[in-house]
Image (spheres, rainbow, N blue to C red):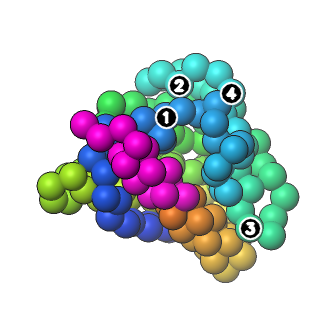
Amino acid sequence: MKQLITEMIINAPAEKVWEVLVEFQKYPEWNPFIKAFQGEIREGKSFKVTIQPPGAKPMTFNPTCLKFTENREFRWKGHLFFRGLFDGEHIFELSPAGPGQTKFIQRENFSGILVPFMWKQLEPKTRQGFEMMNKKLREMAENLQESKPD
């Protein structure tokens, strides 16, 4: 298994970060990495997600939501063709980082027989996509915090 992890501090409370994170219909307007969500996001349910790492073609998956805990965690797991070939568990985690601040972690656990062969190509582009999304999420949440303080 391989893991890719990014994190940052956002100067907004978790509720504001979560508000931006789960407004899925607005992703095409701001998110440079996750281009679209379709379907109901609920634990145990499948949905469609389209991602596009920098310099790559868009890819659409039908993952299953594993966890959806308000203001804390959103987690899903998807597969390429069938389980065990190339699986990805994507996780967004939010935790307090100080007064009015949130630590945002975006990570993915990759497993399957193709991972070792694809890792050198996959890792840098996916990391860049995560970092681009994290920066835009921070910008959106901090702007929301400024316009609608608690």
Tag 2 or tag 1, which sits nearer the N-term?
Answer: 1
Residue at x 61%, y 72% (from the top left corner): 128
- Residue 147 is inside the magenta segment: yes
Give the CA separation, mark 3 to mark 4. 21 Å
Amino acid type assigned to the residue bearing label 1 in the image: Val
CA distance separating discs 3 and 1:
22 Å
Residue 54 is tagged as 3
Q: Is residue 96 above or below residue 22?
A: below
Residues in magenta, as a range: 136-150
Instruction: Name the residue located 65 percent from the left edge and 22 percent from the top edge.
Output: 39
**Viewer-proximal residue among 136 and 42:** 136
User: Dot 1 lies on which element?
Assistant: loop
Magenta stretch: helix, strand or loop mostly: helix
Residue designated by label 1: 22
**What is the CA distance from the residue labelled 2 to the residue labelled 4?**
8 Å
Name the amino acid type tagged 2. Answer: Ile
